[in-house]
Amino acid sequence: MLRYDQLASRVYSERRMPEGTRDLILALGWVTLRDPRRHDPTVTTWQRTREVLNADNKRMWQLVAADAPRYEPDWESGPHGCRAPMVRVDRLCGKSTSLGFAEFDPLTGWLTHWGFCSRPRCREYAKPILERAEGSKSRAPEAIPNTGGLLPLFFAWNWEAKYHKAAELIHTIHGWVPPSYGLSADEWPEVPGQEKPKAFPKLRLVASDGEVIARQGPTLVGADRV
Ligand SMILES: [Zn+2]
């Protein structure tokens, strides 16, 4: 199968991909593999991708920022009421909480929000959890990323510099630091219950300091791992 078709097919089968990331990956793939202007030395991959997407520079950096590999706690899953179970009914207490704290998972570094009401029985239930949670942050490893890291899955480029620049410009990822687990989502440790993205042969986008210096055919890295 042609490389671009392979790329598109893989992108469309990736269920977790935000649409902005999908657009950027397909555009980078098009510009590198199929675009009639791909051998034109006067236009860089970045410029041409911008043109193809009809995006201004800010939009481009927003797309890169959205893919910065990082751990995003699931704020929506936070307690919407007391988490202590009821005694005879199969549900949680659910009363409004007066005690709230976070626990960090010792394997993943991920965050769980706990909340409990002031009823003595619920406080009794909370006690061992609170004890377990105390100091859990210092014992937990660096959180395994759960967001982003898809651009480096498909393209070899100076992504670390790109994400840093995006973090300077786009406040949503202000202060971003590269995860020690790696930039590419396929390098992260598997988290129970979460499907890990499969490796894909990375297209090399030829670049120096973020500028494309030559436009030879792209090099496939690890092409045996389709
Ligand atoms: Zn309660």
Image (cartoon, rainbow, N blue to C red):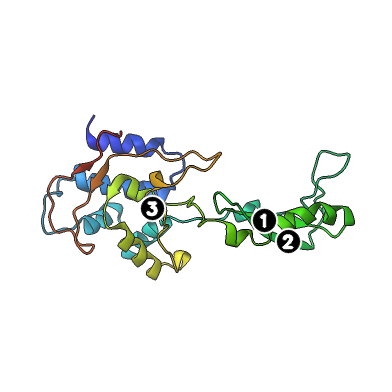
Instruction: Report helix, strand or loop for mark 1.
Output: strand
Disc marking residue 196: none
| Whole-number angstrom distance, CA of label 1 to CA of label 2 | 7 Å
Within 10 Å of disc 3 (Cα), the crowding (few <14, some 14-19, many 20+) is some
Question: Horizontal and vertical percent for residue 101?
Answer: 70, 61
How many labels, in total?
Answer: 3
Within 10 Å of disc 1 (Cα), the crowding (few <14, some 14-19, many 20+) is some
Within 10 Å of disc 2 (Cα), the crowding (few <14, some 14-19, many 20+) is some
Disc marking residue 182: 3
Q: Which residue is mark 1?
A: 113
Q: Nearer the viewer, mark 2 or mark 3?
A: 3
| Between discs 2 and 3, the one toward the N terminus | 2
Question: Horizontal and vertical percent for residue 49?
Answer: 26, 54
Which residue sits at x=47%, y=52%?
145
Q: Are marks 1 and 2 in contact (CB under 8 Å)?
A: yes
Question: Horizontal and vertical percent for residue 178?
Answer: 40, 60
